[in-house]
Image (cartoon, rainbow, N blue to C red):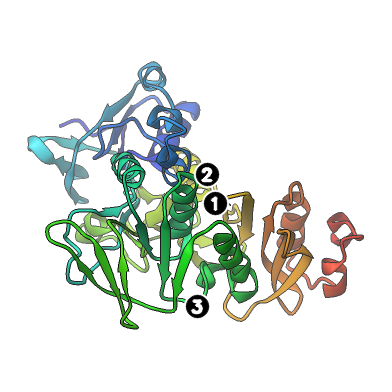
Amino acid sequence: MESESTLLIIGGGLAGARAAEAARANDFQGRVVIAGEEKFLPYERPPLSKAVLRGEAEIESTFVHDAAFYSEQAIELLAGTHALDIDVKTRSVNFSEGLAIGFENLIITTGMAPRRLAIPGADLSGVHYLRTADDATSLHHAIKNASRVAIIGAGWIGSEVAASARSMGANVLLIGSDPLPLYKVLGPKIAVVYQQLHIDHGVELRLGVQVVELRGHGSVNQVVLSDGRIEDADVVVVGIGALPRIELAAAAGLKMENGILVNEFLETSVPGIFAAGDVANAWHPHYQRHLRVEHWANARYQGTTVGNNASGKHEAYDRLPYFYSDQYDASLEYVGNAQPGDEVVIRGDLNQPKFVAMYHHDGVINAALTVNVAKVFKELKVIMAQRKPVDLHALADPNIPFGDLIR
C-alpha cells in the first residue's frame, strides 16, 4: 500500500475537485486521488434546485471539469466508492470492496447530508429530498406529474424549490415553522420581501406551523399541520436543513466542534489532514472566530486553498463568506456574516425589489446583501475589512457612492 507523496481526497464534490486542481497547479508531483460516493464527475450543486430541477440544464453542465481534465492532470477518480474508516496511525483509508489507500496528506470534503423528517408517514412514496443529481432528476419528474407540491421548510432549499416548481407550472404549498421564509438568515425586514415574492407568484404559504404527519396508502397524499389543518399533496419535498458528514473524521479522533475543527490553513488537529467546504469549521482571521459556511463559494475557494496547503503552501483562508440565490426575478447576493442583534440599514426600494441591505453593529458592517443590484460588493468588502463605524445616514443615501465611505 503506497502512501509516499499520495494526496488523498475523500469527497467527490466541488471542494474536492478544486483541491486536486490546485495541488497540480502547485506542481505537486505525487499521486492525487479523489474518492467520491456518487457515479458522476465532481459537480456543482446550486443548479440542482434551479436550472437542473426545472429541466433547463443537463447535469453535465454542472461538472467542475470534464473527464479529459482529470486524465490530463493525472488525477485518479474513484467514483461510487465509500470510505469506511481513516487510520491516522498508519495514515491510510479503507474503502468498500476491500480497497485501502495510504496517504501522506489527506483532505476531507465529505459535505452535507439532508436532515431527515422524523414523523409518521415520512417513509411514504412521494417524499423527496434534494441533495444529489439523482435527487434533482427524480424530483423534476415528480413535480411535472404532481397535482400539488408541498415543500416542508422555508429556508434556502425550500424557497428555491418553490420558485422552480412554480415556474414549472406546479401548484405549490410552502410550509415553514418560522413566521417568514428565510427568517433566520435574512431577518424580518428582508424576509418579508421574500414572503411577498412567493405570494405574488402564486405560492400558498403556511407559516409558523410544524408538519406532524404525512398520510397516504403507500404514497403520500396529505400533509397534517400542527394547527390541525390537513393539506392535500401528492409530492412532498423536505428541506429542513442539512448536517455535516463528520462521522469518518470523528471516528478517526479528529477534533470536532460544529463540524471538523480546522485552523486558518484548513488543517485539522492531526498534522497533514485537512478539511474544507461544508464540513470545515475554520478559524477566520477577519472575524477572529471559527466559521462553518454551507455555500458554494466556500467550497469553491476553500477547495483551492486546501489543495495548495496540502501540497506545500501555507496560505490562510480569509475570504469573506459569500452566497447567492435566484428566485423568480429576484437575484440575491450576500457577503459577510451577520451576527445576532445586528441592525439593518436599507439603501433602495424593498417593494421593487431593488436594494442593498447592510447588517451592522454600532455602524460596523458585518454583512451586506443585494437584491437586483450589481457591482457594489467591491467597495462594501473594503468597508467591512476596515472594521470601522460608518455613518448610517450615508449608508442609506443612494446619492453617496459606497466608495466615498471608504476610510
Instruction: Rate crowding at label 3 as few (under 14), some (14 to 19) or many (20 or more) other CA atoms within 10 Å.
Output: some
Q: Residue at the location (32% across, 66% down)?
A: 256
- Disc marking residue 317: 1
Q: CA distance from mark 2 to mark 1?
A: 8 Å
- Disc marking residue 239: none
The N terminus - image quarter: top left
- Disc marking residue 179: 3
Q: CA distance from mark 3 to mark 2?
A: 34 Å
Question: Do labels 2 and 1 touch, CB within 8 Å?
Answer: yes
Sequence-first tag of 3 and 2 = 3
In this orientation, which residue lies closer to the viewer: 170 or 4?
170
The percent position of residue 327, horizontal first and vertical second, equals 56, 52
In this orientation, which residue lies closer to the viewer: 372 or 257?
372
In this orientation, which residue lies closer to the viewer: 29 or 142?
142
Question: Do labels 1 and 3 touch, CB within 8 Å?
Answer: no
- Kind of residue at disc 2: Tyr
Instruction: Rate crowding at label 1 as few (under 14), some (14 to 19) or many (20 or more) other CA atoms within 10 Å.
Output: many
- Disc marking residue 301: 2
Question: Of discs 1 and 3, which sits in the foreground?
Answer: 3
Instruction: Rate crowding at label 2 as few (under 14), some (14 to 19) or many (20 or more) other CA atoms within 10 Å.
Output: many
The percent position of residue 284, horizontal first and vertical second, equals 54, 61
